[in-house]
Image (cartoon, rainbow, N blue to C red):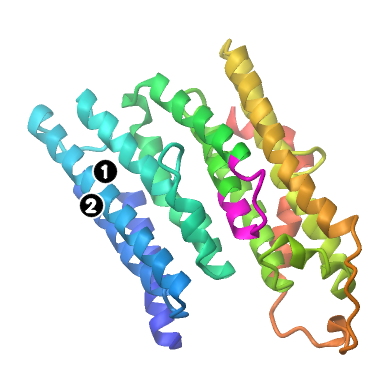
Amino acid sequence: MNPYVLMTLLSSLGLGTTLTFASSHWLLAWMGLEINTLAIVPLMAQHHHPRAVEATTKYFLVQATAAAMILFASTTNAWITGQWDINGIDSPIATTMVMAALALKIGLAPMHLWMPEVLQGLDLLTGLVLSTWQKLAPLALIIQAAQAIDPFTLTAFGLASALVGGWGGLNQTQLRKILAYSSIAHMGWMIIVLQYAPQLTLLALITYIFMTSAAFLALKASSATKISTIAVVWSKSPTLTMTTALVLLSLGGLPPLTGFMPKWFIMQELATQNLPLTATIMALAALLSLYFYLRLCYAMTLTISPNTFNSTTPWRVQAAQTSLPLALSTLMALALLPMAPTIMMLIT
């Protein structure tokens, strides 16, 4: 892609998200979401592969539907209450519609069905943008409107997403689909605690971005898209294999890695709010997710592929891509747990 075009599209992505962050008016927020969608569509379709074009079409239709629902809901709210403020959404009909639309935008269950299919059709870097940056603007709107949304609705979305994200990834062999279900499960953790401690939602989002970035960049560095591919990566780059396995365990929420911190704080908050059943279901859903991360780790580090190659060993070839973003995101994804007391002090 032409670097000037790429720069324009990335600037538009930043502009759309910033516009939604800064807005207190529904129309301005809607405009930011639309700029965001229109900016990522050319990035998704840049390879002109039938899979990529199909994924782009699905994504565009889903996002357009969600945007139309947001516009309709905010207009309905303005009709009933006479105000366009994001914080002033009081009509139950409008609130439910807005939450459903934003859930569709970020792929919360049961509006998640587009997410694995779309992510599977994209290359890993565009998939990374879709899994991280594209979640920011809708989540900002959900956080702003959270006080008006029915608590039962938020709890239902959170539990459904955590369970679907765990169940859905169990029988997958494609790494991008596994990461899509991982994304759905993590969104569930963010939404479940939103009504009690929004700062924990923010913490979970930041750690999710670090871990997902590290996972996508590590897979990009090893050119892996299937489980069978990552089984032979250890011979090319043993260090990368080890750190990728640790990043996956961090995504699963195992101590002493970064991913354990938000899950620990969220479980603690749910227990404080006297919700033991919700906390138990979330913990069991985390076990489901952990199973498929362990499956990936097993394939990467504990199996030896029967293939023998007579060609030049890949690790002798000079790496053509920069490794600084991968190194930084991996460090953040693995080593932030010792900062938990400091973070806890800052957010409480």
Left-right relation of 347 to 28: right
The residue tagged 1 is: 24
- The quarter holding residue 60 reads bottom left
Q: Quadrant of residue 92?
A: top left
Q: Which residue is mark 2?
A: 28
* Residue 165: image location, x then y, percent: 58, 40
Q: Between 342 and 190, which is closer to the camera in this rendering?
A: 190
Residue 216 position within the rendered picture, expressed as x and y whole percent measured from the top left: 64, 62
Q: Is 238 or 135 nearer to us in this picture? A: 238
Q: Are marks 2 and 1 in contact (CB under 8 Å)?
A: yes
Query: Quarter holding the C terminus?
Result: top right
Quarter of the image with the N terminus is: bottom left
Q: Label 1, secondary structure: give it.
A: loop
Depicted 196 relative to depicted 325: above or below? above
What kind of residue is marked 1?
Ser
Can residue 64 be seen at all in this image of the molecule?
Answer: yes
Q: Is residue 99 magenta?
A: no
Query: Residue at left 43%, top 88%?
Result: 2
Q: CA distance from mark 2 to mark 1?
A: 8 Å
